[in-house]
Image: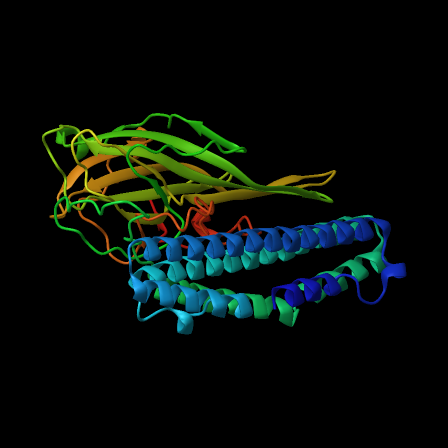
Amino acid sequence: MPGMVLACLSLLVTSGRAAELPANLEAAKRNYEGAISTAERDCRTRTQALNQEYAKSLDQLQDNAQANGDLDSVMATKSEKERYLKARTVTEADLSSSSAVLRSVQTQFLRASIGFEIEKNERLLGLARNHEAILTELEKELTKQGNFDEAVKVREERDLISSSPVISQIEYQLASLRVSLKRIAPETIASPAAGETPAAPRGEEWDTVGGPNVTIYPHGTSPPRSTGVVLKRPAGMSATDRGRSLHWVSAAVQLGEREVSDTRSGIVRAEQTQNFLRIVLGSRSVEKTIIKPTAVVEYFTRPSGGSGINRTSTEIIRLPNFVGSERTTIDTAGVRTGQRVVTTRRVRRVFGTDYYGFVLSVFNGDGDLVYQCAAPSQLKDKGIDKIPGGAVVASPVAPMNVQVAPQRVVRPAPVQAEEPGGGVWGGDNQSF
């Protein structure tokens, strides 16, 4: 199905009157087709890598179960390996009911697969909308030049994209995939490695639910070096009004930026950036243990070239207990921002959303606020005093060590500058 959709999108701009199209429209069409091919290649590469990681996870799971003498887990995992070798996919119906550890691995693979599909479809819609923007501006330019016949051809090509049933199909798939992702909760992998003794409980354990786009590095491990990621100290970070009197948690925060895409097509340049936080958290006192901590990150954006600040999205991240001097490092899912710059001989227009800042709150297991900071300081009075409901919740288990975080699935930036408040890509948008 993914390849079919990509092929249909390509056909939208290759069918019919190629010889009649003006040269600049031909160039725009070639760029569009090239971008679709790149999206198809990227999707195929990431899917292959995920499939390989899942197969390795099943092998490791069987080895661990065998070393621990767990016959039920060995047989369940062996059966799943045989099934997956034939089907090469995992659905909700395939989730194991006999092995909690196997079900956890399956769930994480399924959520990562759905996340890839969502991201790919979002990318396709962004390409289609970007191409429409190019054709709209090209139609205006040709009309101003008096090239009415060519302007009509450009309009026909643009209408072919905007009215395509393929676009409607992608939008429908996106809605269905988001529902599926929300319904499928990840589960904690608790099986010890071969030869290891399960760790003694450190306080009451608790269930986790939520998304695959947060990576948590336990105490003693560090994030790997990542190319294309810029980390810097958040400008103007300080305690919020509520956080000034709180001295329970030690926190260090860096703002991460990863370029998602930067494309040029005719008169339009489109770029998207993933903005995330790398947070190091722990108890301020080695004698104080914080049970069931929860981090809440609120992201704020503003419209490009406009005014107003929007609370764009909120992440809820359940964390391992803060014990002694141990520190936990988190890469949040983050929020995606982007711009489309349309430049003609007469005008330069900028559409999209800029990253503005964040508020980080930490709560203990009783729901009490134990830490809160904001960057920039203009957000110091925007922090919450209790854990919100209905936001994205993230698991403290990285999905099979697959490097998919932090890449939250998000909606492309709007083409129209008049989009109210610039609040895009979902979440709990609120303007201030």
Q: How many marks?
A: 0
Query: In this orientation, which residue lies closer to the viewer: 367 or 157?
Result: 367
Instruction: Give the x, y percent position of residue 5.
Output: 64, 66
Q: Percent x, y for residue 354? A: 47, 39
Say how the picture is coloured.
Answer: rainbow
Q: Quadrant of residue 286?
A: top left
Which quarter of the figure has residue 156? bottom right
Q: Quarter holding the C terminus?
A: top left
Question: Is residue 309 something one can see in this rendering?
Answer: no
What residue is shown at x 44% (from left), y 39% (from top)? 275
| Towards the viewer: 357 or 309 | 357
Q: Left or right of 149: which side holds 221?
A: left
Frontmost residue, 290 versus 15: 290
Residue 274 or 283: which is nearer the viewer? Answer: 283
The location of residue 111, given as percent across then percent down, is: 42, 59
Q: In the picture shown, does residue 179 fall above or below 309?
A: below
The answer to whether residue 69 is visible is yes
Q: Position of residue 336 (x, y in %)?
A: 47, 45
Left-right relation of 171 to 203? right
Give the position of the N terminus as an image quadrant.
bottom right
Q: Residue furthest bottom?
A: 93
Q: Residue at x 55, y 51 (%)?
A: 49
Seen in the picture, residue 88 relative to 281 is either above or below; the reply is below
